[in-house]
Amino acid sequence: MPSPKRVFIGSAQADAAHVDTLKKHLKLYERQNLIQIWEESMLIPGEIRNSRIEQELHAAEIILLLFSADLLAEDFI
């Protein structure tokens, strides 16, 4: 069986509820081992945020960005 596609979900922290909704819609694909999702809430305490996000972005085969005014206002972009 092929490896699951790595999916990066990018969003503002203020949009966490929208990320949760998106993840619910994608859950079936996760259960079928078609995708593996990573998003910022999966950071481990003590990890360097920017480095880990860049690492996950480069590893992702699918990138989903939830654009909002909050995302555009963040310094990371």
Image (cartoon, rainbow, N blue to C red):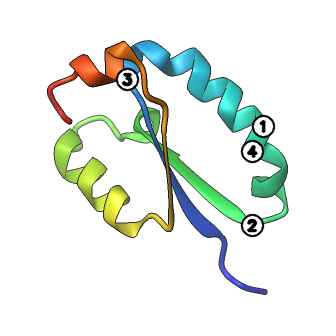
Type of amino acid under label 1: His
The answer to whether 33 appears left or right of 5 in the picture is right
Instruction: Measure how far apart labels 2 and 4 are at the Cα level.
Output: 10 Å
Q: Which residue is mark 1?
A: 25
Which amino acid lies under the numbered mark 4 shown in the image of this protein? Leu
Residue, x 84% and y 63% (percent of image)?
32
Lower position in the chain sequence, tag 3 or tag 1: 3
- Residue of label 4: 26
In contact (CB < 8 Å): disc 3 and disc 1: no
Q: Residues within 10 Å of mark 2 (few under 14, many from 20)?
A: some
Q: CA distance from mark 4 to mark 3?
A: 19 Å
- List the residue tagged with mark 3: 12
- Residue 34 is tagged as 2
Question: Around disc 3, counting alpha carbons within 10 Å, would you say few (fewer than 14), some (14 to 19), or many (20 or more)?
Answer: many
- In-image side of 61 versus 26 (left or right): left
- As drawn, the label of residue 59 is none
- Mark 1 or mark 2, which is nearer the start of the sequence? 1
**What percent of the width, then of the height, locates residue 55?**
28, 60
